Amino acid sequence: MSAKAYILIEGAAGTVPSILKKVKEVDGVLTAHAVTGQYDVIALVEADDVNAVGKVSYSKIQMIEGVIRTITCNVVELD
């Protein structure tokens, strides 16, 4: 069974278009969008398990130039 998470990404001023483009290229990212509010980009990630989702966040997305911080929100199935 795979794991999914929404990753909320805060970027430095002027870097959001570049961050969005690079996030969309990361393996495991199903979709990504620029948004308004405290965070600038939201990405939906799918990986083999929760640990693999974490690796996408810290070893791929957090390494993108301009990314200030991320928050990972794991998807929970309630049914």
Image: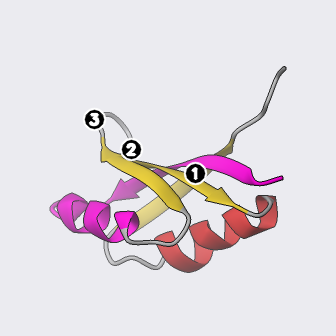
State the residue lying farthest toward the top: 79
Are there few (<14), some (14-19), or many (20+) residues within 10 Å of tag 1? some
Above or below, 61 relative to 2: below
Residue bearing the label numbered 3: 36
Q: Is residue 12 visible?
A: no
Cα–Cα gap, marks 2 and 3: 7 Å
* Image location of residue 30, percent across then percent down: 49, 54
Residue bearing the label numbered 1: 71
Quadrant housing the C terminus? top right
Are there few (<14), some (14-19), or many (20+) residues within 10 Å of tag 2? some
Report the side of 33 relative to 14 (left or right).
right
Report the side of 24 relative to 47 (left or right).
left
Please tell me the numbered disc located at residue 52. Answer: none
Above or below, 39 relative to 65: above
* Image location of residue 7, percent across then percent down: 54, 51
What colour scheme has been applied to the protein in the rendered image?
secondary structure
The residues colored magenta run: 1-24
Please tell me the numbered disc located at residue 39. Answer: 2
